[in-house]
Amino acid sequence: MIRRDRLMLGLAALLVVTAGCSVGDDRPGAPSAAPPAGPTRVILLGDSVAAGQALPLNVALGAAGVEFHSMASDGGGTVVGPVSEQLWRTLPDRLAGARPSTVIYQITTYDWGGEQEQQAAYERLATTVAQSGARLVFVTMPPIKPDDFYEPHMDELANAADAARAVGAGTVVLDAAEVWGTTYQRTRNGVADRSSDGIHTCPQGAARFTSWLLRELAELYPGFRPPDPATWANSGWSGDRRFIGC
């Protein structure tokens, strides 16, 4: 069990996270326009890692007056790789019905395949998101400590961010190394930041990620103001059973 006082000490350091992103070019021939004032309805796509991140994001974006819905799913949620067709069977209709302003795709631990295969899938996602009238934001996955299941696919996962950057076409790629570094790190400031399973995040890590992503959204949307962490960081989500190995 996570001691509340230790968690709060970890969350107190949230605001030191710095921002960094890579922005793709606008669609060829698209007219220039002022950046949108702010997101109104955000959809999160990804696997169980993203599902854990969704818990504080839901509260934080709600505090900012932004609608949020997670379509992340355990053991899937990916647009490329061996389980991707499960998502593609429903994703276009679900996005069209949700009418998001922003779709965030956290690259998943199942985004396996060659770089061309990855890029083709990300381009397909970009087209689908554009058809729903939304803006697509890719977020790189946290570095993992691979077990026997993941070890054969680490080179493929290492190429995923570059494949996403190659899409361009008005998409954005945010490099979450600003939050996690480039290698799996179990604890920060004496508090569990990542799960002992080597894959998932703990409440402190999820909170740091949320604070960083809010700042990145403020860079993308000049009218968006991140809420005070006091409104969301200790609102009860950290006790969710998703946070195992913490």
Image (tube, helix red, strand yellow):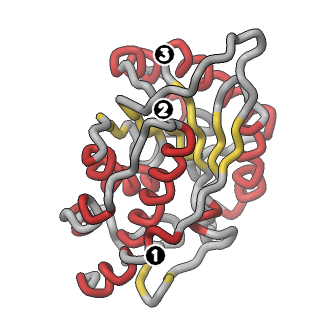
Q: Nearer the viewer, residue 61 or 205?
A: 61
* Secondary structure category for the residue under label 2: strand
Q: For the point 37% across and 77% down, which residue is it? A: 12
Distance (Cα) linking label 2 and label 3: 10 Å
Disc 2 designates what residue? 103
Where on the picture, by quarter, is residue 35?
A: top right
| Secondary structure type for disc 3 | loop
Q: Earlier in the sequence, mark 2 or mark 1?
A: 2
- Closer to the camera in the image, 113 or 163: 163
Horizontal and vertical percent position of residue 133: 48, 16
Q: Are marks 2 and 1 in contact (CB under 8 Å)?
A: no
Q: Position of residue 122 (x, y in %)?
A: 66, 30
Residue 53 lies, in percent from the top left, at 40, 55
Residue ID for mark 1: 193
Q: Marks 2/1: CA distance?
A: 26 Å
Provide the secondary structure element on which disc 1 rests.
loop
Res 79 → quadrant: top right
At a point 46% along the width and 77% down the height, the residue shown is: 196
The label nearer to you, 3 versus 1, is 3
Instruction: Report the residue marked by disc 3.
Output: 133
Is 74 placed left or right of 239 in the picture? right
Left or right of 4, for residue 89: right
The amino acid on which the numbered mark 3 sits, given as a three-letter code, is: Gly
Q: Is residue 11 above or below residue 164?
A: below
**In x, y percent, where is residue 123?**
68, 25
Mark 2 / mark 3, whichever is N-terminal? 2
Q: Is residue 59 left or right of residue 110?
A: left
* Amino acid marked by disc 1: Asp
Count residues near mark 2 (Cα–Cα under 10 Å), then give few for <14, some for 14-19, many for 20+. Answer: many
Three-letter code for the amino acid on which mark 2 is drawn = Val
